[in-house]
Amino acid sequence: MLDDLGREAKPRYGFGDVVMLRWLPRSRRSRQPEMPQEALPGARPSHPTPSGQRTEPQGPQFFSRAEQTLLAALQRPGFNIAGLRRADLLPLLGQSSPATLSRQLARLRHLAVIKRVLGTYRYYLTRAGRAAIAAGCRLTEHTIIPALA
């Protein structure tokens, strides 16, 4: 079908048609043919995660030296009152870059070990996080490492 200027007319949908298209299941909609991957310049295929691979962040690694120093720094008494910032942790951790520390803090936030203070860059330990870190450090230092030695 051609429009007034001789071009192919695009189908026009009324409000009811748009609503209908939106709520129809995808299987009942007319599907457009998918473009082959070679047709997209510079695009790389995404790799879906295998079913056995972790999609959630790992828990604290009590045998990692970097992780032990981070968890020990989080337990400092001064941070219980005022909270902690990434800038406060950087001098205590020495070899960690700011980006690495940000990723570690985000991982601990996802695990609910720390919680962010709204409107600031400060974090504080949750009760469960404080108990988990204390128990994990105690088990590592006093039970597991002496048993391995």
Image (cartoon, rainbow, N blue to C red):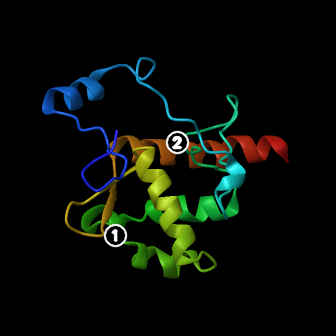
Whole-percent x and y of residue 52?
A: 70, 29
Assign the N terminus to one quadrant of the image.
top left
Residue occupying the point 28% across, 29% down: 22
Residue occupying the point 30% across, 67% down: 122
Label placed on residue 135: 2
Mark 1, residues whose alpha carbon is within 10 Å: few (<14), some, or many (≥20)?
few
Residue occupying the point 52% across, 60% down: 104
Label placed on residue 118: none
The amino acid pointed to by label 1 is Gly
Closer to the camera in the image, 135 or 98? 98
Q: Quadrant of residue 94?
A: bottom right
Question: N-terminal of the two: label 2 or label 1?
Answer: 1
What residue does disc 1 label?
78
The amino acid pointed to by label 2 is Ala
Closer to the camera in the image, 54 or 131? 54
Closer to the camera in the image, 146 or 113? 113
Judging from the image, what secondary structure is the residue with disc 2 in? helix
Closer to the camera in the image, 55 or 139? 55
Q: Is residue 118 left or right of residue 27?
A: left
**Marks 2 and 1 in Cβ contact (< 8 Å):** no
Mark 2 vs mark 1, CA separation in Å: 20 Å
Whole-percent x and y of residue 103?
A: 52, 62
Q: Is residue 20 left or right of residue 111?
A: left
* 37 is higher (above) or lower (below) than 70: above
Mark 2, residues whose alpha carbon is within 10 Å: few (<14), some, or many (≥20)?
few
Q: Quadrant of residue 11?
A: top left
Whole-percent x and y of residue 44?
A: 68, 56
